[in-house]
Image (cartoon, grey):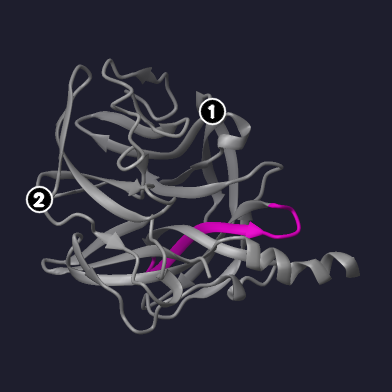
Amino acid sequence: MGSVLRMIPFIKRTRERWSIGIYTGKDPFNLDSPRSNPVLTCADITDVIASSVADPFMVYENEIWYMFFEVYNILSGRASIGFATSKDTSYWKYEQIVLDEPFHLSYPYVFRWDHEYYMIPESRAASSVRLYKAMDFPKKWVAVRNLLEGDYADPSILYHNGKWWLFALRGHDELTLHYSDNLEGRWYAHPKSPLITGNKHISRPGGRMIVFDDRIIRYTQDDEPTYGHQLRAFEIDVLTTTDYQEHEIAQTPVLKASGHGWNADGMHNIDSYRLSENRWIACVDGVCRK
């Protein structure tokens, strides 16, 4: 054990260090960083030795904010899902790891449906898109079924017009789309899937899809020239079982590297919430590669 611990400083230096922050603004496309960022770093993790925290997603329940995120465990060499809580979104208390598998997990897309909480984390290492259900929210999660089989990353789900829509990255540069009438039912490949091929600028999902003011917004990582370079946003114009059309919004990129500090070199995930007419909040992540 002593030899392993002596290696930890070297491991930390050789892996990208991602941290988590909270942004605020008048809309989901014009967000700023308060001075208090980052609100969570690997130093906050208490139950494993972590080198990075990333891919945050939030839900609000009984006047408490719950944030779920990837925790990269140095000793196991893979990530699990941890969570933190907050009453004001400024101060966050790390709680614990809540989902650990014998394979890498990330991107814990958590959502509520029919009075129950579900999570679809990235389980690419298990060659599947797995649906988990909270048996005792927020601490106990159980896999209920595989939605898709295959090499899919960052699955992002949306309920719209009576159907479920699942966007995911296949391989390194293909954005796929599947749909279903039932969350736990059969899923069908969209006839226009893959929607994007051969373009790392816009093919990888980058956070929770949102619907507001009759607009559907899809966030996407820009992974050129480097992974997690910045975050862009597209408005979906047509979403049916036979057609799909979108356009990039004028305010893009919505997140990008600051050039210094915790997010000096990139940002690649966002989960935005509308608090009032002109007040939005979002959990985001950023990387410092130095």
Residue 234 location (% of width, % of height): 20, 44
Q: What residue is disc 1 on?
A: 146
Disc 1 marks which amino acid?
Asn
Any part of residue 171 in sight: yes
Based on the displayed image, in which of its 4 quarters is residue 62 positioned?
A: bottom left
Residue 280 location (% of width, % of height): 21, 67
Based on the displayed image, in which of its 4 quarters is residue 186 positioned?
A: top left
Residue 69 location (% of width, % of height): 50, 58
Q: Which region of the structure is painted magenta? A: 62-77
Quadrant assignment for the N terminus:
bottom right
Disc 2 marks which amino acid?
Asp
Nearest the eye: 49 or 288 = 288
Is residue 72 located in the magenta-colored stretch of the structure? yes
Outermost residue, front direction?
Answer: 225
Any part of residue 115 in sight: no
Give the mark nearest the N terminus, 1 or 2. Answer: 1
Based on the displayed image, in which of its 4 quarters is residue 182 positioned?
A: top left
Q: Does residue 70 appear left or right of residue 229 in this picture? A: right
Relative height, residue 253 to residue 163 (above, below): below
Relative height, residue 87 to residue 241 (above, below): below
Q: Main secondary structure of the magenta part?
A: strand
Residue 82 location (% of width, % of height): 57, 60
Q: Does residue 213 appear left or right of residue 177 in this picture? A: left
Q: What residue is disc 2 on?
A: 213
Q: Residue at x 40, y 30 (%)?
A: 183
- Please rate how many residues cluster around mark 2, counting C-alpha atoms within 10 Å: few if below 14, some from 14 to 19, many from 20: few
Q: Residue at x 36, y 64 (%)?
A: 283
Nearest the eye: 146 or 36 = 36
Query: Separation of disc 1 and disc 2 at Cα?
Result: 33 Å
